[in-house]
Amino acid sequence: MKPLRSLADRLTLSFALVACVLVAVLMLILLSAFGRFNQFTTESGQRHLSEVLRTQLEQDAVLLADTLSAQLDIPLYHLDLSEMGKQLRQVQAQPGLDYVLLFDHEHKLVHDGSEAVPDYGRSLASLQQVPGNAEQVWVGSTLHLLKPIAVSSQTIGHLALAVDFTRALENLTEHSNAISAEAAQKQQQLAGQLVMGSGTLLLLALLFTWLFCRRLFRPLHQLADKSLRYGEGDKSVNFGMTQQDELGQLGNALEQMRRSLEQSHHQTSQLAYLDNLTQLPNRHWFQQSLERLLQYAERNGQRLGVVFIDLDHFKEVNDTAGHDMGDLLLFEAAARLRNLLLELDVCDPETGEVLLARLGGDEFVTLYPAPERSDQVAELAGKVAATLDQPFLIDGRYFNISSSIGITLYPDDGISSSEILKNADIAMYAAKQSGRNQYAFFSPQMNQALSERLEILQGVRKALAESQFHLEYQPVIDLRNGRIRAAEALLRWNHPEQGLISPARFIPLIEDSDLMEPVTRWVAHQAIHDLLELQTLYPGFVISINISGAALHQASTREFLTDLIQAQGVPPHCLSIELTETSMIRHLDDCRDTLAQWKNAGINIWIDDFGTGYSSLSYLHQLPIDGLKIDRSFIRELRPESDHSLVESIVTLARSMKLKTVAEGIETDSQLACITALGSHYGQGFGLYRPMRYSSLKPLLEQQCTETSS
C-alpha cells in the first residue's frame, strides 16, 4: 500500500478517523435512546389500552349487572323462583359469563339459574367461586361483580356474576405484540436510514475537508516541492510567495534563508580556496591547480616547474616583533611575489591566473608552466630570492628576511602531485641547510639527507624520554695560576645502537626544530643539579650552558631559567649563559630585555665565538655582558712568530670595557704561552682538559682543593 505522504491526505485521514469515531458514538447513543423511547411508548400505549379496555369491560359488565338487577327485583321481591330462573338462564347463555347467582338480603343463595338450585340457602361467604363481599374485583382475567337489588330504596337481595374477559385480553395482547413488532421494524428502518444519512453526511464532510486541506496546504506542498528541488541542486528555485498569511511569511523567510545560504556558500567557497591573511589561493587550490596542470603538461608533452619558497628567520620576526607584525610581513611578501609573477607573466595557460599560493605558515609555492630549459625556472627562483631579500618597511620598522627555495621539474622529479611537491619541499630544506638565501634543484640524494634528519629528530625525542643524553664538562682554567675556575656544560648523546653521536650531527637540527626548548630545559636542570653539588666542594665554582639565539625571543625559556635558579637557590654569578655573537646581533633590540632579566637574576652573560660576527662592536656597550669567549679560529693561528695583533686587540678591547676573556680551542703549549702573554684571563681547550663526565670532574676539583689547602 502506498503510504500517505501528503499533509492534506494525512490531515483528512486523521479527521475522518475522529469523525467516524464521533459519529459512531453519536449513532449508538441515538439508537439506544430511540430504542428506549420506542419501548417506553409501546409499553405505555399497551398499558393505557389495557386500562381503557378493562374500564370498558367493567362498564359493560356493570351495565349487564344493572339491567339484570332491574329485571330481577320484582321476581325476587315476590320470590318468584320460576321467573328468576328464566332470567338467569337467559343471561348465562351469553358467552364469557362464568356464573350468575341471586342472593336474598341476608346473602343466602336464592337461585343460580339451574332447575334444582343445589346450593339454595347457602351463604355467600361459603361459596368458593364468589370472592368475598367486594362489589367489583378482578381475579385474573375474570371480573367479579356483587350488585345490590333494591325496591323502594330497600335492599332485598344481591346479584353476583362473573364475566371472563380472557379472550378480549388475549386479543389485546396480540394487538400489543403486533404494535411492538411494527415499532421494532420501524426502529430498524429508522436506524438504517440514520446510518445511511450519517454516512452520506460524513462522506460529504470528508470530501469537503479533503478539498479544503488540499487548497489550504497547496502553498505548503509547493514549498516542500521547491525544497526538494533545491536540495537536488536546482538553484533556479525561488521560495517567495505573494500571499500574506503565515505560509507566505514562511515562503519569504525560506527565500531569505536560500539567499543567505548561497551567499554563505559563496563565501565558504572563497574561504576554501583563499588564504584569509594574504588573499592568495591556499593549499587546497594549489593541489587542484597542480593536478590540472600536470594533466595539461602530460597531454601536451610539456614540462612543469614547481618553485617551493620558505621565508628564512620568519619565526624570529614573530617572536621578536609579535604575530601581528609577522602577519603584515607575510602580506607584504605575498604582494611582492604576486607583482613579480605578473611582471614576468608567469600565469596559468588555461585560465590566465597568477600561479601563486600560500601553503601555510611562511611557505609559498608557484608553478612555471612549460619551461623549455631548467635554467628558466632557476632564473625565476633567483628573481624571487632577490625580491624577498630587499628590506621590508612595516609600521616604521625595517625587517630583513631571505628565502630558501626548492625546485622540482615534471616529469624529471616525479609524476604525481604529491611526489613532485614533496621533492620540492626536500629541495627547499636542502637550500636552507646550505646556508639559506638560495635555491636548490631536487636530487635523489636529498632524500637520504631528509631521512637522516627525521631519524635524528625522532631519536632526540626518544633520547629525552629514555635518558640517553648526558652532560660532559670541559674545564676553564685561570691562566694566571692554572687552576680550574669553571666548566662549560656540553650535551652528549649516547645512542643505544649507534653509540656516541657527534654533536655536529644533532645540535644544528635541534636548534632548527621545536625541540630546542625541551632540550634546553633538560640541560639547565642537569647542569644546575651538578653545580649545586659542587658548591659544597668548591664555593663559587661556575658552570656555563649554551643557549640558542631563538631562546632569546621565547618568553617561556626566559622565565623558566629565572624561576629555576630562584627555586633551586643557585648562588649569584655561579651560572653562566653563553650566546653566539651572531644570534645577539641579529635581534639586538629584542634580546636586551631578556639579557637584563637574566643579569638581574645573578646569571653571567658571555658572548661565545666572539670575532666571527663581522659586525659593529657598538652592541658591547648596549648589552649587560660579563665576558667574551675568543673564537678558536683566532687561537688556532697563535704561534710565537705569528702576528698576534687581532687577538691582542680583542683582549685590549675587553679590558677597556672591564670584560673578562676566555680563549677557546687551546691545543698546544705555544698557544697557551701566547694567549697567556697577551693577557687573557681564562683558557679552554683540548690542550688543557678534554670534556669529561661529572664523575671525573668532581675528583679533579677535589684534588685541586686538596693541593691548594696543603
Image (cartoon, helix red, strand yellow):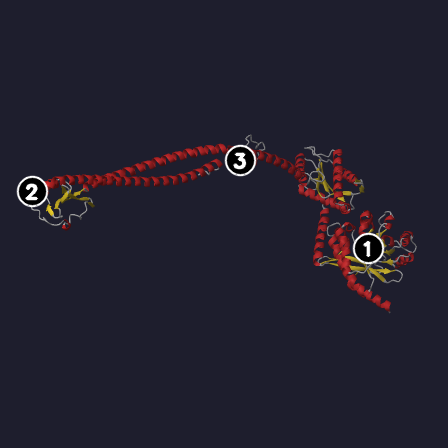
Earlier sequence position, callout 3 versus callout 1 = 3
Q: Helix, strand or loop at disc 3?
A: helix
Q: Nearer the viewer, residue 153 or 114?
A: 153
Label 1 sits on residue: 600
Horizontal arrangement in the rendering, residue 337 relative to residue 242 (left or right): right
Label 2 sits on residue: 82
Q: Do the residues labelled 2 and 1 touch (CB within 8 Å)?
A: no
**Residue 383: quarter of image:** top right
Q: Quadrant of the C terminus?
A: bottom right
Cα separation, mark 2 vs mark 1, equals: 170 Å
Q: Which of 331 and 643 is in front in this view?
A: 331
Residue 708 in sight in this render: yes
Q: What residue type is labelled 1?
A: Asn
Tell me where residue 217 appears, x and y as whole percent: 50, 34
Residue 237 in sight in this render: no
Label 3 sits on residue: 224
Q: Which residue sits at x=76%, y=53%?
A: 557
Cα separation, mark 3 vs mark 1, equals: 74 Å
Earlier sequence position, callout 2 versus callout 3 = 2
Q: Which of 195 and 125 is in front in this view?
A: 125
For discs 2 and 3, the disc positioned in front in the rendered view: 2
